[in-house]
Amino acid sequence: MSWATLVISVVLALPASAVEDPWYTQGNFEPTRRLEFTVVNTLDFDRVNAPVVIKRTDFPVPDVHEMWVTVVDPELPPYEGPSEELLVVQGGHQLRAEQNGHAVYHQMDDLDKDGIWDELFFQTDIEANAEKTIYVYLGQNIRGWNEHYTHANIGSYARHLMPFWESENVGWKIWFANAVDVYAKRKPMLMSNRLYMENLDGYGVSAIDRDLGSDIPRVAGSFGGGAICLFENPDEPDAVSLPRFTPTQGALPFRSNWNAGQLSDTRYAYEVVVNGPVRSMIRIRGFNWDSGNGFYEYVQDYAVYAKQSYTTSRVEFTTFSPRVEGVRPCAGIRKKPEEELFILEDGLLISAGPEEIRDPENIDDREAQRVEFIGTALIVRDEYEPEYQLVASRSGNHTFRIIAPRDNTYEFLLSSAWSEGAVYNNEKDFIDYIRMTRQEYENPVEVRFVRKQNKANQ
């Protein structure tokens, strides 16, 4: 599901003479079974908050309840234990004093919603060209509150059901069906629940609390902070088809950015797949998309990660029936209206510049807020053979044509930042972050299962 899908390989057990890490304990939790994994960073720079995924199909004990799994980094300093005051507030599920490592926030995510977990997910720091040991301890352990660093939900927003997904620095939401809005924060926080529960205008939310930030790009008819499309006419290389601009929608008696009726035109369904604490996912299903040159339906997943300023997306066309030859899917972002920076490298593009932020409804005479730097980036892996194409229509957009595998599935990554944010708030830092992220995206950390251990046998 995620770009951090791992290479899992079984290796021979270490010699009996190898030095063992001491066993982890937490309060009266004294496990007697553990699984040892080696996490590998093949890049020549340190990785921070690197996503790690172990699929259940590659997990040595697939039939295990989530409350029987504790992920431990033996290199991290143990928690000294809570004060009596904290215990009164947090109760019996509060983490207790640890020895020999520290428990890592993790998730056991059921992605296909069949009631069985599919992926064990966590994040870790790992030095350049290095390996580190991670233990998964087995045994009932109900302690350990999870601080949330990501959030995803479906909210009713101005009578319109919309998906929201965010990390602490930046968030995304969908107002116009297939193109994402971006909202950025001035201080790290989760706040989309306030947007949809309190009905806060994304452009005016700073009037409530300046730290909450603002919507930062205008979408309208463009690709906004990211969108999918199809190139259906090789003779018109910059002509694109989008699911919300169809011949049916064009037949409306008025100009609209919306689709027509849900029976006659493209329709959408939204689902929360995972809601934190360290990874959150939204699923979008697009049905009944008739572009005039073909009929399509798709499933698109967006995921966000703790302490990161990007979202990854996986698109699967469940129906791909073009009526013309040479149709290729694509991903794209809107070209900044005052673009001062444009970088195009293999599978990577960045558009940045100053931008005026103002509610597009123009409800009063408030002056627009001018932001000196807003950057948006798109990354597509080499395996999809991305080919750049400028789309001059619909306000101007930077896109990549994509060669999807036979199952018509592909992935991409989106990122945004602004000059008023806590991180990547200038051109250099944003460029450095995106170039580093591209390398990590192309080279997910590797995980090797080493062995099972039983403390009673040692």
Image (spheres, rainbow, N blue to C red):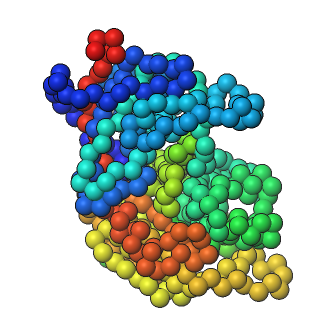
Pick out the residue farthest to the top: 456
Residue located 64% across and 27% down the image: 93
Q: In the rendered view, does 296 fall on the left or right side of 219?
A: left
Find residue 78 and report its horizontal and vertical position in percent. 48, 37
Quarter where residue 422 is shown: bottom right
Nearest to the observer: residue 5 or residue 430:
430
Determine if residue 234 is in view.
Answer: no
Report the side of 12 relative to 95 (left or right).
left
The structure residue drawn at horizontal position 39% and vertical position 72%, both measured from the top left corner, is 432
Residue at 47% from the left image edge and 25% from the top image edge: 25
The residue lying toward the viewer, choosing from 18 and 177, is 18
Query: In the image, is 26 to the left or to the right of 202?
Result: left
Q: Quadrant of residue 164?
A: bottom right
Asked if 68 appears above or below 457 in the picture, the reply is: below
The residue drawn where x is 23% and y is 29% is 19
Q: Is residue 425 visible?
A: yes
| Residue at the far right in the pictured view | 364
Q: How many marks?
A: 0
The answer to whether residue 247 is above or below residue 137 is below
Quarter of the rendering occupied by the C terminus: top left
Q: Quadrant of the N terminus?
A: top left
Q: In the depicted view, which residue is nearer to us: 396 or 254?
A: 396
Name the spot of residue 326 as percent of width and height, x first.
29, 64
- What is the x, y in percent for residue 393? 49, 80
- Name the spot of residue 291 as percent of width and height, x first: 48, 61
